[in-house]
Amino acid sequence: MVIDRAIVKRWQRATVVGLMSLALCSIVGACASEGQKSPPPPAADQVRGHADRAFEKLKQEEQERATQPLVPQ
C-alpha cells in the first residue's frame, strides 16, 4: 500500500492547525471568563467586634506598661 506524502502532509497540517485553534480558543475562553469573586465584605457587627477587641487589648497593654517600673537607659 502506497501512501501519498502530499496527503499525509495535508493531514498533519490540518491536525496541527486544529490543535492550535483549540488551544487558542481555550486560552481566549479562560481569559474572557469571570475572574474569581472576592469574599463578601465583613458585616458591620463583625468589624465593630474586631475593633472592640483591639481596643480592649490596647487598653490592657497600656495598663500593664503603667504598672511596670521605669527602667533607666
Image: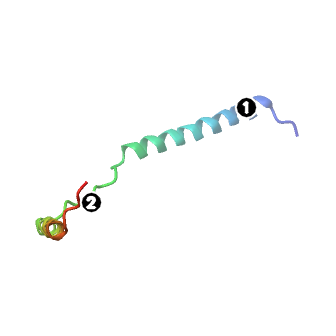
Q: Is residue 14 above or below residue 55?
A: above
Mark 2 or 1, nearer chain start: 1
Residue 72 percent coordinates (x, y): 23, 57
Q: Is residue 39 above or below residue 4?
A: below
Q: Secondary structure at mark 2?
A: loop
What's the distance in space between the residues labelled 2 and 1, CA to CA? 52 Å
Q: Can you tell which of label 2 and label 1 is closer to the viewer?
A: 2
Residue 73 percent coordinates (x, y): 25, 54
Q: Nearer the viewer, residue 34 or 44?
A: 44
Per the rendering, the mark at residue 46 is: none
Q: Pointer 1: what residue?
A: 9
Q: How many marks?
A: 2
Q: Residues within 10 Å of mark 1 (few under 14, many from 20)?
A: few
Q: Is residue 16 left or right of residue 7?
A: left
Residue 7 percent coordinates (x, y): 74, 32
Q: At label 2, which amino acid type do we have? A: Pro
Q: At label 1, which amino acid type do we have? A: Lys
Q: Are marks 2 and 1 in contact (CB under 8 Å)?
A: no
Indicate the quadrant where residue 61 lies. Answer: bottom left
Q: How are the colours assigned in the image?
A: rainbow
Q: Nearer the viewer, residue 57 or 49?
A: 57
Q: Nearer the viewer, residue 69 or 12?
A: 69
Q: Residues within 10 Å of mark 2 (few under 14, many from 20)?
A: few
Indicate the quadrant where residue 4 lies. Answer: top right
Direction top: furthest residue = 6
Q: Pointer 2: what residue?
A: 39
Give the residue drawn at x 19%, y 69%.
Answer: 68
Q: Secondary structure at mark 1?
A: helix
Q: Is residue 27 left or right of residue 34?
A: right
